[in-house]
Each structure stands twice: as C-alpha cells, then as structure tokens.
Image (cartoon, grey):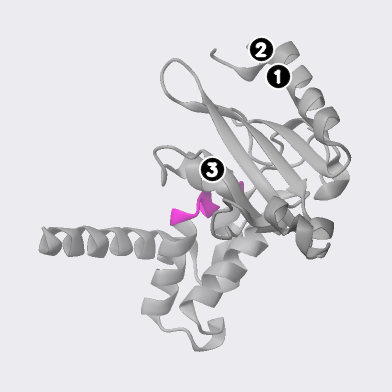
Amino acid sequence: MEHIRDESELLNSLVKGIAAQFGDNCEVVLHDLTGSYESTITAIENGHITGRKIGDPGTNLGLELLRGNHVDGNKFNYVTQTKDGRILRSTSIYMKNNEGKTIGALCINFDITELMVAEKTLHSLTSTGLQPEVKESFVSNVSDLLDALIQEAQEQVGKPVAVMAKEDKMKMIQLLDRKGAFLIKKGGEKICSYLNISKYTLYNYLEEGKSLSEAEGDEDA
C-alpha cells in the first residue's frame, strides 16, 4: 500500500465497524499522514469524544513519529486525557508504505471516565494491563497543538521566557524540535515570537544544540 487511498473502502469500513462494536464512547480516527499536518483526519466516528472532525490535525504523538523520534510508533492500550478532563484508553497503529515511510494511522480512543467512577466490581475492566499515562493533545487545529507543545516544553525548562538565559532557550528549542514542532507550518515563526528571538538566532540555537548533543554523545562513547 503506497497511500491510504489505496485501501480507503476497507479502512473506512474498519473505522465504522470498530465504533459500532464498542458504541458511542469509542472514538475511531483514520489519519492520512502524507500531506499537511494541519489536516490529517480523513474519517472519524464519535468525534464528540475529543471534539474533532474530518479535516482536523493529528496529535503530538504523530508529530513525534514523523520527526523520526520513534522507530515503531505503535502504542497499545495507553491512558491519556482530553482537554475537559475525560480519561481515555487508547491505541494508535501506524501504517507504512513499501519503502517503510509512515503514511497513515488508525487510532482508537475509548472513554472510560464513567467506568473509572463506577463500583468496585468494574475496576478490573478499567485498570488491568493499562500502560503508564501518556500525554497526548487532542486539538481541532494545529495552532492549538503548537501552543500545547510550547507550554509543555516551557514547563520542562521550568522558567518563564522573561528570565530565560540563552541555555534555557536552547533547551526549549531542542525539546520542541524533538517533539516535531518545526514540522508544523509557521511553527518556527511562532516559536521565535514566543521566545522573542530572530529566525537567525533560532537556526543558530538549533545548530548549536545539535553540536552539543553530538559532542556529549562522543564523550559517552
């Protein structure tokens, strides 16, 4: 399969079938990852779970995979949370073409919020075999996704921009690069504006950060 369009009938039926099997609390999403990340969703059932629709972007996990941070991006039975605090049990399966390039993803998000507050007899249905919580941002546009990535990176740096030194900004830029933020259209411009630096400075920080990482790698070896 070179493109998810090649199997669109089968994949769309799969999306509908899984959602029908598990009901209104199960969101099923098909992503086309060959075009702009601003609009990856080509099919979705029960989009009310995360508030998304056809034409909306993917999440930060897909960006990280496209950035090349993971050899195998598949994640099974992990726990994440929506913006309004609902708890989801999720699975993300990525599809590749004959050359090994990621071209699409099938994602299942089952809302287990009500089950988690149900009686103790239901506890085994919501907790057995669950993996540690994964932070995943469900958004309806890439601008919100970029905002979430910037906020997460700043929290990891631990300082407001106004008091950040050069090293802090370099660290934040490296974090954003690893998370695929610069794959988002005009991502670099927004990050420059947020950090109050020029594009020239941004590129210098990126290159300097890569050089430091490579040097540290050589020392460890």
Residue highlighted by disc 3: 75
Q: Locate residue 25 relative to residue 166 in the image: left or right.
A: right
Q: Is residue 106 left or right of residue 173?
A: right
Q: Which mark is residue 11?
A: 1
Q: Residue at x 61, y 46 (%)?
A: 185
Amino acid type, mark 3: Lys
Residue 101 percent across, percent down from the top left: 46, 26
Residue 69 in the image: above or below residue 36: below
Give the CA distance from mark 3 to mark 2: 22 Å
The amino acid marked with disc number 1 is Leu
Q: Nearer the viewer, residue 56 or 11?
A: 11
Dot 1: what SS? helix
Nearer to us in this view, 190 or 40: 40
Determine whether label 1 and label 2 are within 8 Å by CB: yes
Residue underneath mark 2: 7
Left/right placement of residue 84 relative to residue 65 reads right
Q: Is residue 196 visible?
A: no
Q: Earlier in the sequence, mark 3 or mark 2?
A: 2
Q: Are there few (<14), some (14-19), or many (20+) residues within 10 Å of tag 3?
A: some
